[in-house]
């Protein structure tokens, strides 16, 4: 079976073992650019889940990733790396709804509402306007619709998949959908990755961090394997 895992820093294992989010934060891995730091990736829940399933993982996650990037890279993998014959499972942790991906001069930039992202000088004004004008309600509605479309796209291709939310949820959405067993609590804030780990007694690595250590990643891999087994997805 092929296991495809995608998401943002929660899935990339940011800070799980050391303080790095990106490989290039460490001088030893500067040529790996924005890829997850190898030591943190090894400790991530996706890698641990793959070991439980005895399969080779394809972790496409990147810290600070937008949902647009998650969709783009997942579709790219399915189109280019999967021939449609091998068994496959797609597991996606969705990022916060306001994040965007901009293509500038052939390079992809991930931007969020923090106000501290790096963009070329040509787009600094656009970025400031983006931060000032983020409409969370509209962003939430937009990504609810986009993820629903992707769910149906995968369903039509008979690709088993499981989605879950990292920090934000769709609780404000009125037009709630029936996702079957393909989405863990899309409308329930208690069932986000962050809140489930908190309920299980795990704390972030620091008060000013959103990230968890390798013990929490081990815990989440157990949450996932139970869900997959209970819902007969593996």
Image: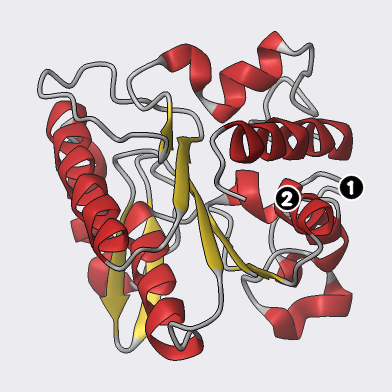
Say few, some or many: other residues with alpha carbon within 10 Å of mark 1 (under 14 / 14 to 19 / 20 or more): many
Residue 47: in sight, yes or no?
Answer: yes
The mark total stands at 2
Picture residue at 74% right of the left edge, 13% below the top: 200
Residue 55 appears left or right of 2 = right
Q: Which mark is residue 121?
A: none
SS under mark 2: loop
Label 2–label 1 contact, CB within 8 A: yes
Q: Nearer the viewer, residue 67 or 207?
A: 67
Vertical order, 200 against 193 (above or below): above
Place of residue 94 in the rendered image (x, y in percent of width and height, measured from the top left): 43, 44
Residue 2 appears left or right of 97 = right
Q: Quadrant of the N terminus?
A: bottom right
Q: Which mark is residue 13?
A: 2
SS under mark 1: loop
- Residue designated by label 1: 17
Place of residue 102 in the rendered image (x, y in percent of width and height, measured from the top left): 28, 68
Res. 84 image quadrant = bottom left
Say few, some or many: other residues with alpha carbon within 10 Å of mark 2 (under 14 / 14 to 19 / 20 or more): many
Picture residue at 82% right of the left edge, 55% below the top: 40
Place of residue 224 in the rendered image (x, y in percent of width and height, measured from the top left): 66, 37
Q: Nearer the viewer, residue 7 or 2?
A: 2
In three-dimensional space, the C-alpha distance between marks 2 and 1, rounded to whole angstroms, equals 8 Å
Vertical order, 13 against 200 (above or below): below
Residue farthest along the front direction in this orientation: 232
Q: Nearer the viewer, residue 232 or 80?
A: 232
């Amino acid at each position: 079976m092929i296991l495809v895992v995608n998401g943002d820093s929660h899935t990339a294992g940011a800070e799980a073992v050391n303080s790095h989010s990106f490989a290039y934060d460490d001088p030893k891995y500067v040529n790996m650019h924005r890829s997850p730091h190898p030591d943190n990736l090894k400790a991530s829940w996706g890698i641990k889940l793959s070991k439980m399933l005895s399969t080779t993982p394809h972790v496409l996650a990147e810290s600070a990733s937008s949902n647009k990037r998650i969709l783009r890279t997942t579709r790219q993998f399915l189109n280019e790396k999967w021939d449609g014959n091998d068994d496959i499972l797609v597991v996606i942790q969705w990022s916060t709804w306001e994040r965007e991906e901009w293509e500038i001069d052939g390079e992809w930039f991930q931007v969020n509402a923090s106000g501290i992202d790096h963009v070329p000088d040509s787009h600094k004004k656009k970025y400031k306007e983006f931060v000032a004008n983020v409409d969370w309600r509209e962003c939430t509605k937009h990504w609810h619709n986009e993820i629903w479309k992707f769910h149906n796209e995968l369903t039509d291709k008979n690709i088993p998949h499981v989605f879950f939310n990292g920090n934000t949820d769709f609780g404000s959405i009125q037009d709630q959908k029936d996702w079957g067993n393909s989405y863990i609590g899309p409308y329930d804030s208690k069932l986000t990755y962050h809140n489930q780990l908190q309920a299980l007694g795990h704390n972030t690595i620091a008060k000013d961090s959103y990230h968890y250590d390798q013990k929490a990643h081990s815990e989440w891999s157990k949450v996932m394997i139970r869900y997959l087994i209970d819902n007969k997805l593996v």
